[in-house]
Image (cartoon, rainbow, N blue to C red):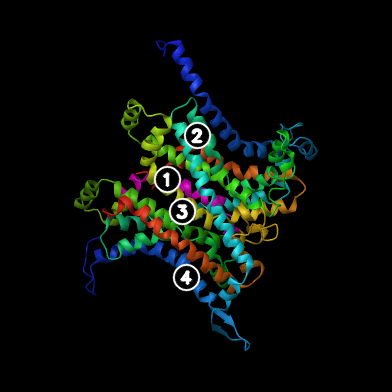
Amino acid sequence: MPRKATTTGLTFSKVEPYLYLAPATILIILVFVYPIIEILHTSVLQNTASGIKTLGPANYRLVFQDPVFWGALGNNGKLLLSVPIMTVLSLLIAILLFEHVRGWQFYRSVIFMPYILAIPVVGMTFVYLLGLNGILNTLLRGVGLGFVTQDWLGSAKWVIPSLSLVIVYREMGFGVVLFLARLMSLEKEILEAAEIDGANWWQKHVYVTLPQLSGVIEFFVVVELITMLSWVFAYVFTMTGGGPGFASTVMEFYIWKHAFAFRSPGIASALAVILLLVTSTLIILQLRLRRGSMEDRL
Amino acid sequence: MKTTPLRFRLRIFLSSIPTQVILIIFSLVAIYPIYYMVVTAFKTRPDWLRNQFGLPNPFIFQNILDALGKGSIPLWFGNSLIVTAASLIGSTIFSALAAYAIARFRFRGKTLYFNSMIALMVIPPAVLILPLFVLMVNIHLVNTLPSVIIIYSGLLIPFSIYLLVSFFRSLPSELFDAAAIDGCSNLDTFWRITLPLSMPALVTLVVVNALFVWNELLIALVFLQNAEVKTLMPGLTLFKGHFTVNEPLIMAGTLIATIPMVLLYLFGQRLFVEGLVAGAVK
């Protein structure tokens, strides 16, 4: 289209980029901006004796007095602890695969498989595997550890570690593939130089490989921290229903409960605002990470 | 290899044993739940009770037939296909247009817009569902497929814009200069040059986003409550509720739900990996 001056004095070329942004922006406003404004508003509405809603902190007061809320927040906190575990395990496997052992491509494909399974499918399968007569207990009995067998998902004490195990199971595939891709792009000369200088396996990887992977490790850790706060609903819903009692209730699940089972939109909104604030702290990390090399070019 | 002394080859072989053992253990752990799902789907229930971990004996196909016949799995499967396809088409076109503007134009607010997209990738869907539900009730879209199609399309946009901006910026600028000199309008350049050259990035994006939409549970659960509009994931949880005491039938259901993503993975493993790694490895 030719660049014509419009009647308002704006040139078409000035407006053009905004036209391209318009459809995406409308959806973003509908799906993100409007709901966030709504929960901020709903969370500070309180019922009064006269039946008229006024502004006030009643919902937040109720939430802060609710032990289940603190338990849910604590459960998300405990799930964050599985991030270092899956990071270290993924790194170990990726480095072993990188050394080009026989069949490394096969191992990579197999270890990545769990990541493409749907979380509900993983959850529904692990309900059997972690049950009283599941594989875990059968293996424990087999090696003479029968006394530690448990109903892993039915025990208030073990339910969060068991959920973590399942999450690590699925997310590790992503970590391994990610780290391996970065390893394969490293320059071989540096590692060879370290070998010539007499570095052993441990020294070579701790002092030479890991520092070069710091960027991708940071990326994985941030993505997984976000996952532990924002994307664990499906595990909890399909494996434990938040139980036993409220022992495995996480923030997402508790918001959903208040919104759709208890029908208390005020409380659900207050919970949602709190979760939003918690995840917002990760935005700073996320921005630092994703901007990186694009800073100079935009 | 022929000239390598035997003793040396033996040493290499022996030194790789610990590595092989670790990798085999992790592979077994990774594959076991999948193996369990597959073998259980072909067992009778008495066989499953007797023998949880071995191969099916007798091997039966009845669970698969029942899963396809008794529940609404074929219907839900179809709904999932419609929702996934529609969400991908919507989000990809809108994101590509926006990413093109960000990558190729200078305009006020560009950096802010791009940073906002990165920030939005962190927002949990659980925060958004209640106001969206009220909205969908008011515009009479609740319990219809368009409700989740709109929401998924919106949720996919921040990541899609992020991925496409970085790809569009990597295309050689000479091409765009040449197009401009030849009198191509910006929209022409977008359709005829940018998009065709970006096929690898677009395919990767579609594969990764398909995985997300196909596997999503929370939003589908909230917005599609009637059995006839459910997608596969909430459908499976309903199916499980109905047939709690028939474990092989449930595993047959989960197996059917898994097949499309496994096929996508087998045919496009490289694309999966590229999509997931995109943005992390520079």
Of residue B72 and residue A111, the one placed in the foreground of this image is: A111
Of residue A195 and residue B91, the one placed in the foreground of this image is: A195
> Which amino acid type corresponds to the residue marked 4 in the rendered image?
Tyr
Residues under labels 3 and 4: Cα distance?
23 Å
Residues under labels 3 and 1: Cα distance?
32 Å
Mark earlier in primary sequence (1, 4): 4
Residue assigned mark 4: A34
Name, please, the residue furthest toward the left: B181
- Count residues near mark 3 (Cα–Cα under 10 Å), then give few for <14, some for 14-19, many for 20+: few
Mark earlier in primary sequence (4, 2): 4
Instruction: Please tell me whether residue A35 belongs to the stretch shown in magenta.
Output: no
- Count residues near mark 1 (Cα–Cα under 10 Å), then give few for <14, some for 14-19, many for 20+: many
Magenta-drawn segment: B191-220
Question: Mark 1 or 2, which is nearer the eye?
Answer: 1
- Count residues near mark 4 (Cα–Cα under 10 Å), then give few for <14, some for 14-19, many for 20+: some
Q: Residue at x 47, y 32 (%)?
A: A96
The reply to whether discs 3 and 2 touch (Cβ–Cβ < 8 Å) is no
Dot 4 falls on a residue whose secondary structure is: helix
**Whether residue B224 can be seen here:** yes
Question: Mark 3 or 1, which is nearer the eye?
Answer: 1
Q: Is residue A288 above or below residue A116?
A: below
Q: Are marks 1 and 2 on the same chain?
A: yes
